[in-house]
Each structure stands twice: as C-alpha cells, then as structure tokens.
Amino acid sequence: MPDFTYTAHPARIVFGSGTLERVADEVGRLGRSRALVLAGEHLHDVADRVEKILGPLAAGRFDGAAMHTPVEVTEQALAVLRETGADCVVAVGGGSTTGLAKALAVRTGVDQVVLPTTYAGSEVTPVLGETAEGVKTTRTDPAILPETVIYDVELSAGLPRPLAVTSAVNALAHAVEALYAPDANPVVDGMALDAVRHLARGLRGLDTDPDARADLLRGAWLAGTCLGAVGMGLHHKLCHTLGGSFGLPHAPTHTVVLPHAMAYNAAAAPEAMRRVAEALGAADAPTAVFDLIVDAGGPTSLRELGLAEADLERAVELAVAKPYPNPAPLTRDGLAGLLRRAWAGERPPGPTMIDGLTAQVVATFAGTEDPRLRALLTDLVPRLHAFAVANDLTQAEWQQGIDFLTRTGQACTDTRQEFVLLSDTLGLSSVVDVLDNSRTPDTTPSAVLGPFYVEGPPELPQGADVSAGLPGTPLYVDVTVTDTEDRPVPDAVVDVWQSNEDGFYDVQLPDLDGPVLRGRLRTDAEGRLRFRSILPSEYPIPDDGPVGAMLRAAGRHPYRAPHLHFMIDAPGHRRLITQLFVRGGKYLDSDAVFGVKEDLIVDFEPRTSPTPDGAAVEGEWRELCYTFRIAGTA
Ligand code: NAD
C-alpha cells in the first residue's frame, strides 16, 4: 500500500431534515450571541426564516452576496459586520454566500455557521476564491474553514431542478478528481466513492425518489470534504479558466466539462475510472457520467453556455499556460480536442474494444494471492497492450517478436544467458541495479551481474593467480573491503571473474581447461585481499545469437569496456555486485550493456618495479589498488 498523509478539517456537521430550526442552538454552542445573517439573491425568504429562528441572536442582515466573492461586496459586508457588532456570521445560500462568510472570517476571525442551499461543497473547505479588479485569486487558510455546517435537506430541496442538476455534477467532479489526486489517500477515496454513489442515485431519482435530495446533499457534503482534503486536476483548472476568463457560469461549466476531462484522463488513471464506473454501475466512467447528465436534463455543450467558437483557441492556450499535476500529460492537441468536443456537446469517446479487453485481462489477476505479484501483473498488462496500440503492431511484427524471444530462450544454456544479455543491452539490468542496489551513497556503486557469472567458482587462497598462467599483461590486485565506517570486513567472500586477453570468458572457450579467470577468495583479518591475474581487455558480448542480431539491426557495436567483476558477501552486510573499469580503456562511453559508472572507472597503474610477490615479470605489469565499502544489513 502506498504511504499517505491525511489531514482532517475540524468542522461540526449537522445533517438532516428541518435542521434549520437548530441554527440558534448552534450559534449558542459556539458561545456567540450576535449573528450577522448573510444571503444572496433568491433567498430572502429563507434568510427571513433564519433571522426569525435566531430571534435575539440576530444582530443584522446582509443580502448582497455575489458570484466569485468580489472584494468590494466583502468591504460593504465588513462595514455592516462592524456596525452591528456581530461576533459570528450565519450564511444561507450557495457557494457565493459561503464565499462571503469565509472572506469575512479570514479578515476578522468571526465564527461561521453555514447553511448550504446548493451542492457546491465550499462550506467544508478551507479555501477561498476572491475577485479583485476582475482577477480571481484563491487562498487556503485554516481560518477560512466554517466552524459549523447545518445541512438541511428541506432547504436544499428549494433549489430549482436545473440548478440542482448542475450543482450536483459540480460535486461529482470533486469526488472524481479526488480519486486520482496526487495526494489521494484511503480516507478520501472512501468518501469520494460514497459521494459518487449518492450523487448518482440522487440525480437518477430527482423526479421520482423522495430521498433524492437527501442523497444529493449527503453526496455534496462528502464530495466537498474531498475537495478540501486533496488537490484537484485538469477538470477543476479548466473550469476555473473558463469561468474566470470567459465568464461562464460555475456549476453548468463543471457539468459540461466533467465527462470530457474524465475521458482525457481515463487511460492515465485506470484504477480511479474503474472505481467510478463501479460506483455508477456502468462499464465506462466518462460516458456513464455524460449519460447521467443527459438523462437528468443537464447542459452538455459550452456553446449553449455562451462560449464563442473563436474563444476555443485562447482557452487552450490558457489551459496549458501553467503546468499542474494531472494523471494525463497536458498537451495542446489533447486539450484542443477535449474543448472542441465539450463545446460541440459531443458524447466523449467511449472505451474501445481493446480497453474492455485490457480491463478483462487485468480483472483475471484480482485473485492473485501474492500482493506484489498481483500489482506487477496488473500493471504489466495495460502497459503491454498500450505498447501494441500505440505502435499499431501488426500480426507479422508480433510473430517476429515471439520468434525473437523463442530464439533468445533457445540460446540459453548452463553457461550462456541470452535473456540476461537481452536485459543488459536494453538497459533494463542497469535500471534494476540502480533501483535495487545504488541507494546508499556511502557505499561502492554496484554494477550489473552480467551473463558470465557461474555459480560455485573454484576456492582460491590469498595471493593465487586466477589467470593460471594465461598470456596477458600481469595484473596484481590489492583490494580491501570495509564497512561504511571504514572498518575492515574480515572473512568476506569475494568472487572475481573476468575475460582473457582476447576478450573471452572461460565459458566461451570450450577447449580451455577451465574454470579459469574466475575464483572465490576471502579477505584476511585486515579486510584485505590480494591475487594475481591479467589485465582485462575490451570484448564483444556474444553476438552470434538473437541479441547480436538486434544490435546489428540497430547499428550498435557489441563491445564492453574492459573491467573486472566482483561479488562480495560478508555476514551482516548487503551483497555488493560490481565491476571496476580500466581507466583509459576502450568503449567506456559506449558500453554495450550500459554498465559503466564514473565512480567505478579506476587506475590500473602501470609498473615496472619488482612485483609484490617477487615473481619475475618481463616488462610492464599493472597494479589495481581499491577499497570497497559495503553496507550493513541493518
Ligand atoms: P451560487 O452560490 O452562486 O448559486 C447559484 C445561483 O443559485 C444563485 O443565483 C443563487 O442565488 C441561487 N440559489 C442558490 N440556492 C438556491 C435555492 N435553494 N433556491 C433558489 N435559488 C438558489 O453558486 P454555487 O454553484 O453554489 O457556488 C459557486 C461559487 O462558489 C463559485 O464562486 C465557486 O468558485 C465557489 N466555490 C468555492 C468553493 C471553495 O471551496 N472555495 C467550492 C465550490 C464552489
């Protein structure tokens, strides 16, 4: 399970039918005695009722709440707040009225009791969007979060049907985007899915089910809580742009854009889409949301909301101007297609037959007992399918791939590992090596095992000649193994292996009386190990098999830079598999298996002085001195 962080926002929620009657109790519960009632247009009657129930707690009234919380309106309300000496605000209305309450609270610290009449969800978020001189800016502050929210189903039932539909889809958008948010977590996921279920049931039952409004309000509360807890993606940013720059109405814009934004993200967020589809009881989430909106009578085109076709291009430019986290990368072409379909009111492209097939295959792994295996298989299949789709793979190419892999397997023997070679030449071995082994900067870097390691090499004593007298420039190796505190590691088992002077390993030379140029040695009490060998040379990886054919087809050379292999095992320490490369050797910058790391290129010093073991050597010999630092297992 991935790590997560979850911050709960401390709000009191009162939910039910007729809960409006409890507004005076809730103000009293906060220890407040002078409430300024806030409302917007269309809700004067409800505000009158609130004032009546508050009785002596009502200190005044401000009816001017407006869309997008303009600061000049906030200034007027602030003056009324001061005049009346109110110590709290009671807001009754949609997101616009809640916005005004928040704007007053963040400036003065007054407590807020909010009675939402729409499904916007603002009442449970610590976020405030304000407009000054035509520019809307958003800020987040714990002081913005209302202290108490009274959800009254009867109150929200007054919301006219068209507004109810668009407002509910606005809430649905919070829940959907929460499921693929970068900071998604299991608590929010649970709320989001419950929100999707309640909102869908409410929308479907608007004309027939007496509980539909309760479902919508409950869904709105849950979805709003998701909005306040995690970051939103493409859909919200796009709606923000369309609302801010083209004056499109808030909830209807959300309604039109949501299915298209979901379709845009569907391939990049398959798990979120699968869960939304499941909660909707449908096979495909984006088209199911579109159909839900159509059935509920909601708007489906930006054209009908008043966006001019000529504005589409600027909308795309604005949408790609500032990058933000989103499951699918934001491309100009992709967004242009999305906006054009949303403008024209088209049904978003449904799942292809292949999407369905991929989902079907993935589903067959659901019962895999080992969770890691399940996760790997579940991820591998969509990527393989996507590769085939993206490249429009032909039957002949598929067959060629199968034949290639078959030949790769057939080339494998006890002493030749063509699959490792394939992995090496594709760079995969180095990727896994970096992921698995190279996370401790204070240890010697690791390197790939390579295809020529043979289990159980011959045990050799200190000072042995692993080359068994084979021709080549003599090499004296003097290495020490220490831990990360520079303490020597005695009795470490060190396997070494290398190529001969012509670049061949013993396993490639059937006539050789091997094993040779490989051995298992142990460090002494000082963590030191000395042995004699010959200078390794560059060599081609075996290129007479399918991997060689691949390299030739790609115009790549098969050479490895000259190196010596080491595998170090010591009790209480992590195994280190690495290679030391000969400084100045060939192919250091184009190693066929991408195995060279800068820190592993070392000096194999030329010498002519007497050899360390006194053996007679004609001419130059080389000396390799090196200290390996290995990590403890703890
Ligand atoms: P709104 O509050 O502007 O209401 C839309 C219209 O419906 C208004 O004309 C309003 O008077 C009317 N209305 C509301 N309730 C009614 C009822 N019961 N009966 C009859 N008419 C009613 O719109 P909204 O969609 O609720 O909120 C949108 C605003 O809220 C936007 O400014 C948006 O940015 C903001 N918002 C903020 C957050 C946040 O977390 N900060 C979250 C969601 C929305």
Image (tube, rainbow, N blue to C red):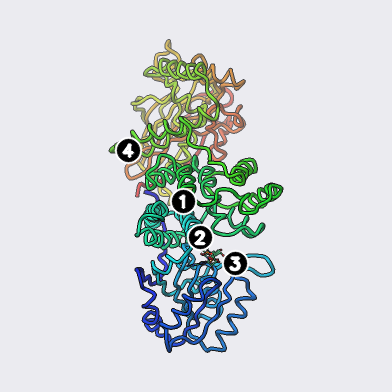
Callout 1–callout 2 Cβ contact below 8 Å: no
Callout 3–callout 2 Cβ contact below 8 Å: no
The response on whether ligand 1 sits within 8 Å of label 3 is yes
Which mark sits nearer the N-terminus, 3 or 2? 3
Which mark sits nearer the N-terminus, 4 or 2? 2
Callout 4–callout 1 Cβ contact below 8 Å: no
Residue placed under numbered mark 2 in the picture:
163
Q: Residue at x 60, y 22 (%)?
A: 556
Point out the frontmost of discs 4 and 1: 1
Point out the frontmost of discs 3 and 1: 1
- Residue 614 screen position, x and y as percent: 48, 29
The response on whether ligand 1 sits within 8 Å of label 2 is yes
Which mark sits nearer the N-terminus, 3 or 1? 3
Residue placed under numbered mark 4 in the picture:
366
Which label is found at residue 634? none
Point out the frontmost of discs 4 and 3: 3
Residue placed under numbered mark 1 in the picture:
296
Q: Identify which amino acid the numbered label 1 is placed on.
A: Ala
- Estimate the spatial distance between the alpha carbons at disc 4 and disc 1, rounded to whole Å: 34 Å
- Estimate the spatial distance between the alpha carbons at disc 4 and disc 2, rounded to whole Å: 41 Å
Residue placed under numbered mark 3 in the picture:
68
